[in-house]
């Protein structure tokens, strides 16, 4: 009977809520103590712990650069470089070198921007999302007009005061002459670059000859000689071979570019929203403009008053 009574008492004890509470409390306390010891070990200022992932990353970076695995000596040097960087970083923090440092501020601000943009980059757009965005921003992908032309050059150095007139006379002689007329080359001067420019945009022609020349060439009718047209080099006669009008490509042609542009727009939007939320938490105080009367007493006679503009 005594054994049965003891068993019943034990069962009642095991069902007591107070015992459950004490056991749970003891487990939580033990877990908290273990966690605090772990944190304390990690926070030891004179310990530098490198994880297996960090060591693997060092090896991976070396392999990607040199196309082979590091030797034991090279790997030890990599580890020592990483340790040196961490030591210098901690010592710099101890000396408060991160305070009021413009470069550090810019770096930290840039990391905050990257964090905000990464939120947008994590989302993979669907084809329909890209197509809809493309329809609203098709002008971003417009292909510019292109032109192919041949030119004859009349040098102002070789023909001082006569280059334009000589070009005009040559144009009269070339009336109805084809583009590849043998006579054409005999009328002009050698040009330091190309005589023929194929499939060029206005921007490319501008880089070669200047904006006025490029604009004039794009307005010429293909199939005959035109001019004289002036560039930074001198005077030219131009035969336009072909003009390809500008156009907006189909979505399928530009899908890869559309995705890149879409991600860029999403990142910019995410950053603007994140900054607006952060900015709303701060009040910016600017100094009041200096008193003009007080400033006049110390300002040199030839100095003009300055106004602080936000």
Image: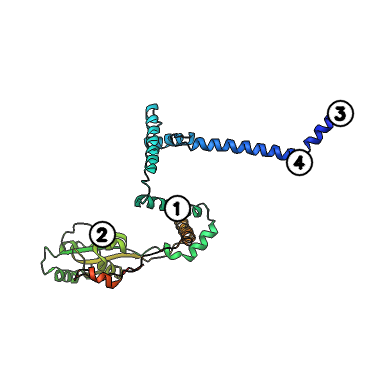
Question: From mark 1 to mark 2, how far is it between C-alphas?
Answer: 51 Å
Question: In the rendered view of the protein, which quadrant contains the C terminus?
Answer: bottom left
Q: Can residue 176 be spotted in the picture?
A: no
Residue 275 lies, with reference to residue 296, above or below; the image says: above
Residue 15 lies, with reference to residue 112, above or below; the image says: above
Q: How many other residues sit within 10 Å of disc 4, few (<14), some (14-19) or many (≥20)?
A: few
Residue 111 versus residue 241: which sits nearer the camera?
111
Going 39% across and 36% down the picture, which residue do you hit?
82
Q: How many other residues sit within 10 Å of disc 2, few (<14), some (14-19) or many (≥20)?
A: some
Going 44% across and 54% down the picture, which residue do you hit?
113
To which residue does mark 4 refer?
17
x and y, in percent, of residue 109 in the image: 41, 53
To which residue does mark 1 refer?
112
Question: From mark 2 to mark 3, how far is it between C-alphas?
Answer: 111 Å
Question: Please, what secondary structure does the residue beneath circle 3 have?
Answer: helix
How many marks do you count on the picture?
A: 4
Q: Earlier in the sequence, mark 4 or mark 2?
A: 4
x and y, in percent, of residue 303 in the image: 21, 69
Q: How many other residues sit within 10 Å of disc 3, few (<14), some (14-19) or many (≥20)?
A: few
Residue at the far right in the pictured view: 1
To which residue does mark 2 refer?
196
To which residue does mark 3 refer?
4
């Amino acid at each position: 009977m005594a054994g049965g009574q003891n068993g019943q008492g034990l069962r009642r004890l095991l069902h007591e809520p107070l015992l459950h509470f004490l056991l749970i409390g003891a487990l939580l306390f033990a877990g908290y103590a273990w966690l605090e010891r772990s944190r304390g070990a990690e926070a030891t200022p004179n310990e530098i712990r490198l994880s297996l992932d960090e060591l693997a990353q060092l090896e991976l970076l070396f392999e990607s650069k040199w196309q082979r695995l590091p030797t034991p000596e090279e790997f030890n040097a990599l580890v020592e470089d990483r340790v040196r960087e961490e030591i210098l970083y901690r010592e710099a923090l101890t000396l408060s070198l991160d305070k009021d440092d413009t470069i550090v501020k810019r770096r930290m601000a840039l990391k905050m921007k990257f964090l905000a943009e990464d939120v947008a980059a994590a989302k993979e757009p669907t084809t329909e999302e890209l197509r809809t965005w493309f329809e609203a921003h098709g002008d971003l992908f417009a292909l510019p007009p292109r032109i192919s032309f041949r030119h004859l050059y009349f040098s102002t150095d070789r023909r001082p005061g006569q280059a334009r007139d000589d070009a005009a006379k040559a144009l009269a002689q070339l009336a109805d002459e084809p583009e590849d007329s043998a006579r054409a080359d005999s009328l002009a001067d050698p040009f330091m670059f190309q005589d023929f420019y194929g499939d060029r945009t206005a921007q490319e022609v501008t880089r070669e000859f200047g904006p006025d020349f490029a604009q004039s060439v794009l307005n010429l009718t293909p199939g005959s000689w035109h001019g004289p047209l002036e560039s930074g080099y001198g005077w030219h006669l131009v035969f336009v071979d072909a003009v390809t009008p500008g156009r907006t490509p189909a979505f399928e042609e530009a899908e890869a570019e559309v995705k890149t542009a879409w991600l860029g727009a999403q990142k910019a939007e995410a950053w603007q929203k994140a900054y607006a939320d952060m900015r709303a938490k701060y009040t910016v105080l600017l100094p009041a403009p200096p008193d003009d009367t007080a400033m006049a007493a110390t300002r040199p006679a030839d100095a003009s008053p300055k106004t602080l503009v936000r």
